[in-house]
Image: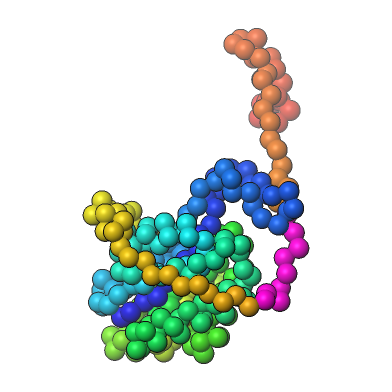
Amino acid sequence: MDVLVYVKRVPAVGGRIVLTPDGREVDTSMLGFTVSPHEECAVEEAVQITERHGGTVTVSTMGPPEAIEQLRTAISVGAHAAHLLVTTGVDAGPIATSRALASSVRELEGGRGRPFDLILCGNEAADTGDHQVGVRLAHALGRPCATGVKQLQIEATGESVEASREYRGSQEHFTLRLPAVVTVKEGINLPRYPSLPGRMRAKKADVSTATPTLEPEPLVMQRLRVPRTERTSAEVLGHGVDAVPALVALFETLGVVP
Protein backbone atom coordinates (compact mmCIF):
# COMPACT_ATOMS: atom_id res chain seq x y z
CA MET A 1 0.00 0.00 0.00
CA ASP A 2 1.78 3.13 -1.22
CA VAL A 3 0.48 6.37 0.29
CA LEU A 4 1.24 9.96 -0.72
CA VAL A 5 0.58 12.65 1.90
CA TYR A 6 0.44 16.38 1.22
CA VAL A 7 1.22 18.71 4.11
CA LYS A 8 1.52 22.48 4.41
CA ARG A 9 4.02 24.65 6.26
CA VAL A 10 2.01 27.09 8.39
CA PRO A 11 2.85 29.64 11.11
CA ALA A 12 2.87 28.23 14.63
CA VAL A 13 0.47 30.71 16.16
CA GLY A 14 0.24 30.63 19.93
CA GLY A 15 -0.65 34.21 20.64
CA ARG A 16 -1.90 37.37 19.01
CA ILE A 17 -2.03 37.30 15.20
CA VAL A 18 -0.43 40.30 13.51
CA LEU A 19 -0.84 41.13 9.83
CA THR A 20 1.68 42.77 7.53
CA PRO A 21 1.06 46.50 6.80
CA ASP A 22 -0.68 45.72 3.49
CA GLY A 23 -3.06 43.31 5.27
CA ARG A 24 -2.36 40.50 2.81
CA GLU A 25 -0.22 38.15 4.92
CA VAL A 26 0.35 37.09 8.51
CA ASP A 27 3.48 38.71 9.92
CA THR A 28 5.69 35.70 10.65
CA SER A 29 8.78 37.61 11.73
CA MET A 30 8.27 36.53 15.34
CA LEU A 31 6.68 33.14 14.65
CA GLY A 32 7.96 29.63 14.09
CA PHE A 33 6.50 27.20 11.57
CA THR A 34 4.87 23.81 11.82
CA VAL A 35 2.51 21.46 9.96
CA SER A 36 -1.27 21.90 10.11
CA PRO A 37 -2.81 19.63 12.79
CA HIS A 38 -5.06 17.84 10.28
CA GLU A 39 -2.02 17.04 8.16
CA GLU A 40 -0.04 15.77 11.14
CA CYS A 41 -2.87 13.26 11.53
CA ALA A 42 -2.74 12.47 7.80
CA VAL A 43 0.95 11.56 8.12
CA GLU A 44 0.26 9.42 11.19
CA GLU A 45 -2.62 7.65 9.42
CA ALA A 46 -0.43 6.89 6.41
CA VAL A 47 2.31 5.47 8.65
CA GLN A 48 -0.21 3.28 10.51
CA ILE A 49 -1.64 1.99 7.21
CA THR A 50 1.79 0.90 6.01
CA GLU A 51 2.58 -0.63 9.38
CA ARG A 52 -0.52 -2.82 9.01
CA HIS A 53 -0.42 -3.53 5.28
CA GLY A 54 3.15 -2.85 4.22
CA GLY A 55 4.17 -0.34 1.59
CA THR A 56 5.63 3.17 1.64
CA VAL A 57 4.73 6.67 2.74
CA THR A 58 5.83 9.63 0.61
CA VAL A 59 5.25 13.07 2.04
CA SER A 60 5.25 16.22 -0.08
CA THR A 61 4.69 19.93 0.29
CA MET A 62 4.78 23.06 -1.82
CA GLY A 63 6.59 25.96 -0.20
CA PRO A 64 9.90 27.77 0.31
CA PRO A 65 13.19 25.87 0.74
CA GLU A 66 12.76 26.11 4.53
CA ALA A 67 9.74 23.79 4.27
CA ILE A 68 12.21 20.92 4.08
CA GLU A 69 12.17 20.96 7.89
CA GLN A 70 8.48 20.02 7.95
CA LEU A 71 9.21 17.18 5.54
CA ARG A 72 12.04 15.93 7.74
CA THR A 73 9.66 15.97 10.71
CA ALA A 74 7.35 13.66 8.75
CA ILE A 75 10.27 11.34 7.99
CA SER A 76 11.19 11.27 11.68
CA VAL A 77 7.78 9.78 12.55
CA GLY A 78 7.82 7.09 9.86
CA ALA A 79 7.53 8.51 6.32
CA HIS A 80 9.90 6.82 3.88
CA ALA A 81 10.46 9.53 1.26
CA ALA A 82 9.91 13.26 0.83
CA HIS A 83 9.41 15.59 -2.11
CA LEU A 84 9.55 19.41 -2.01
CA LEU A 85 7.94 21.65 -4.62
CA VAL A 86 10.07 24.76 -4.19
CA THR A 87 8.37 28.14 -4.44
CA THR A 88 9.28 31.69 -3.52
CA GLY A 89 7.28 31.35 -0.31
CA VAL A 90 4.25 33.32 -1.50
CA ASP A 91 1.10 31.28 -0.93
CA ALA A 92 -0.79 30.25 -4.05
CA GLY A 93 -4.58 30.00 -3.93
CA PRO A 94 -6.42 26.67 -3.78
CA ILE A 95 -7.01 26.43 -7.53
CA ALA A 96 -3.40 27.08 -8.55
CA THR A 97 -2.16 24.86 -5.70
CA SER A 98 -4.33 21.88 -6.61
CA ARG A 99 -3.33 22.11 -10.27
CA ALA A 100 0.35 22.22 -9.35
CA LEU A 101 -0.06 19.25 -7.00
CA ALA A 102 -1.94 17.27 -9.65
CA SER A 103 0.91 17.85 -12.08
CA SER A 104 3.40 16.75 -9.42
CA VAL A 105 1.40 13.57 -8.72
CA ARG A 106 1.51 12.64 -12.40
CA GLU A 107 5.29 13.18 -12.50
CA LEU A 108 5.89 11.18 -9.32
CA GLU A 109 3.66 8.35 -10.50
CA GLY A 110 5.31 8.42 -13.93
CA GLY A 111 8.68 7.91 -12.26
CA ARG A 112 7.29 5.06 -10.17
CA GLY A 113 5.51 3.44 -13.09
CA ARG A 114 2.30 3.03 -11.08
CA PRO A 115 -0.15 5.25 -9.18
CA PHE A 116 -0.16 5.78 -5.45
CA ASP A 117 -2.88 3.64 -3.88
CA LEU A 118 -4.03 6.48 -1.63
CA ILE A 119 -3.44 10.22 -1.43
CA LEU A 120 -4.09 11.82 1.96
CA CYS A 121 -4.51 15.54 2.67
CA GLY A 122 -5.56 17.52 5.69
CA ASN A 123 -9.21 18.57 5.59
CA GLU A 124 -8.10 22.20 5.59
CA ALA A 125 -4.93 24.18 6.20
CA ALA A 126 -4.58 25.85 9.58
CA ASP A 127 -3.81 29.26 8.09
CA THR A 128 -6.18 29.68 5.13
CA GLY A 129 -8.89 27.10 5.92
CA ASP A 130 -9.86 26.81 2.26
CA HIS A 131 -11.25 23.23 2.46
CA GLN A 132 -10.64 22.98 -1.31
CA VAL A 133 -7.24 21.59 -2.26
CA GLY A 134 -7.97 17.91 -1.59
CA VAL A 135 -11.27 17.99 -3.50
CA ARG A 136 -9.79 19.90 -6.43
CA LEU A 137 -6.81 17.55 -6.53
CA ALA A 138 -9.09 14.50 -6.70
CA HIS A 139 -11.13 16.12 -9.48
CA ALA A 140 -8.00 16.97 -11.48
CA LEU A 141 -6.77 13.37 -11.18
CA GLY A 142 -10.19 11.86 -11.88
CA ARG A 143 -10.19 9.87 -8.62
CA PRO A 144 -12.89 9.31 -6.00
CA CYS A 145 -12.70 11.50 -2.92
CA ALA A 146 -14.07 11.63 0.63
CA THR A 147 -13.59 14.63 2.92
CA GLY A 148 -13.66 15.29 6.65
CA VAL A 149 -12.84 11.64 7.35
CA LYS A 150 -12.18 10.47 10.93
CA GLN A 151 -11.85 6.74 10.32
CA LEU A 152 -10.12 4.79 7.54
CA GLN A 153 -9.97 1.07 6.91
CA ILE A 154 -8.29 -0.61 3.95
CA GLU A 155 -10.35 -3.62 2.83
CA ALA A 156 -8.71 -7.04 2.89
CA THR A 157 -8.51 -7.20 -0.91
CA GLY A 158 -6.52 -3.95 -1.00
CA GLU A 159 -8.76 -2.67 -3.78
CA SER A 160 -10.88 -0.21 -1.80
CA VAL A 161 -10.97 1.84 1.38
CA GLU A 162 -13.77 2.36 3.90
CA ALA A 163 -14.01 5.98 5.04
CA SER A 164 -16.25 7.30 7.80
CA ARG A 165 -17.07 10.78 9.04
CA GLU A 166 -19.40 12.55 11.43
CA TYR A 167 -22.05 14.84 10.03
CA ARG A 168 -24.66 16.63 12.12
CA GLY A 169 -24.71 14.00 14.81
CA SER A 170 -24.76 11.01 12.45
CA GLN A 171 -22.14 8.75 10.89
CA GLU A 172 -21.57 8.64 7.14
CA HIS A 173 -19.73 5.71 5.55
CA PHE A 174 -18.17 5.57 2.09
CA THR A 175 -16.47 2.86 0.08
CA LEU A 176 -13.91 4.26 -2.35
CA ARG A 177 -12.22 2.20 -5.01
CA LEU A 178 -8.46 2.71 -5.01
CA PRO A 179 -6.63 4.77 -6.09
CA ALA A 180 -8.46 7.52 -4.21
CA VAL A 181 -8.00 10.84 -2.42
CA VAL A 182 -9.09 11.32 1.20
CA THR A 183 -8.94 14.42 3.40
CA VAL A 184 -8.75 13.64 7.12
CA LYS A 185 -9.59 15.64 10.22
CA GLU A 186 -7.76 16.07 13.49
CA GLY A 187 -8.86 13.33 15.86
CA ILE A 188 -8.65 10.43 13.42
CA ASN A 189 -5.60 9.37 15.47
CA LEU A 190 -3.05 10.65 17.94
CA PRO A 191 0.18 11.60 16.11
CA ARG A 192 3.31 10.09 17.60
CA TYR A 193 6.34 12.05 18.74
CA PRO A 194 9.57 11.69 16.75
CA SER A 195 12.00 9.22 18.27
CA LEU A 196 15.73 9.88 18.50
CA PRO A 197 16.52 7.27 15.80
CA GLY A 198 13.77 8.82 13.70
CA ARG A 199 15.29 12.28 14.04
CA MET A 200 18.70 10.95 13.07
CA ARG A 201 17.25 9.16 10.05
CA ALA A 202 15.37 12.28 8.99
CA LYS A 203 18.47 14.44 9.29
CA LYS A 204 20.33 12.23 6.78
CA ALA A 205 17.40 11.54 4.44
CA ASP A 206 17.48 12.80 0.86
CA VAL A 207 14.60 15.07 -0.11
CA SER A 208 13.86 15.28 -3.82
CA THR A 209 12.90 18.68 -5.21
CA ALA A 210 11.12 20.14 -8.20
CA THR A 211 9.92 23.56 -9.29
CA PRO A 212 6.15 23.70 -9.88
CA THR A 213 4.52 25.70 -12.64
CA LEU A 214 1.91 27.88 -10.96
CA GLU A 215 -0.93 28.97 -13.19
CA PRO A 216 -2.63 32.32 -12.59
CA GLU A 217 -5.05 32.09 -9.68
CA PRO A 218 -8.58 33.14 -10.71
CA LEU A 219 -9.47 33.78 -7.07
CA VAL A 220 -7.71 36.91 -5.83
CA MET A 221 -7.33 37.59 -2.12
CA GLN A 222 -7.79 41.29 -1.43
CA ARG A 223 -7.15 41.59 2.27
CA LEU A 224 -7.03 39.60 5.51
CA ARG A 225 -8.90 40.63 8.64
CA VAL A 226 -8.23 39.51 12.18
CA PRO A 227 -11.59 38.88 13.93
CA ARG A 228 -12.31 41.25 16.79
CA THR A 229 -11.97 39.63 20.20
CA GLU A 230 -13.35 40.85 23.49
CA ARG A 231 -10.72 41.91 25.98
CA THR A 232 -11.20 40.86 29.58
CA SER A 233 -9.82 42.59 32.63
CA ALA A 234 -9.65 41.95 36.35
CA GLU A 235 -10.40 44.40 39.15
CA VAL A 236 -8.59 44.18 42.47
CA LEU A 237 -11.20 44.59 45.23
CA GLY A 238 -8.66 45.11 47.94
CA HIS A 239 -6.10 43.30 50.05
CA GLY A 240 -6.61 41.05 53.04
CA VAL A 241 -9.59 41.68 55.33
CA ASP A 242 -10.10 45.15 53.82
CA ALA A 243 -11.42 43.44 50.64
CA VAL A 244 -14.18 41.52 52.48
CA PRO A 245 -16.93 44.21 52.30
CA ALA A 246 -16.36 44.71 48.56
CA LEU A 247 -16.36 40.95 48.01
CA VAL A 248 -19.64 40.52 49.91
CA ALA A 249 -21.20 43.36 47.91
CA LEU A 250 -20.13 41.67 44.69
CA PHE A 251 -21.65 38.36 45.80
CA GLU A 252 -24.91 40.15 46.63
CA THR A 253 -24.93 41.74 43.16
CA LEU A 254 -24.41 38.33 41.55
CA GLY A 255 -27.12 36.79 43.74
CA VAL A 256 -24.71 34.33 45.31
CA VAL A 257 -25.71 35.48 48.81
CA PRO A 258 -29.04 37.02 49.87
Q: Nearer the viewer, residue 71 or 130?
A: 71
Give the total number of marks visible in the rendering.
0
Provide residue 148's location: percent of width, then percent of height. 52, 72
On screen, 33 above or below 246? below
Left or right: residue 158 compared with residue 96: left
| Residue 222 within the segment the image draws in magenta | yes
Residue 82: image location, x then y, percent = 37, 68
Q: Residue at x 52, y 64 (%)?
A: 63
Q: Write down the quadrant of residue 100 in the picture.
A: bottom right
Whole-percent x, y for residue 233 in the image: 68, 31
Q: Which residues are magenta?
A: 216-225
Kindly identify the residue that appears in the image at 50 percent across and 72 percent down: 211
What residue lies at 71% left-to-right and 42% top-to-bottom? 230
Quadrant where the C terminus is found in the figure: top right
In the image, residue 72 lies at what x, y percent?
37, 59
Q: Can you say whether 100 is above or below 228 in the image?
A: below
Left or right: 106, with 158 as reference point? right
The secondary structure that dominates the magenta segment is loop
Q: Is residue 163 left or right of residue 11?
A: left
Which image quadrant is residue 69 in? Answer: bottom left
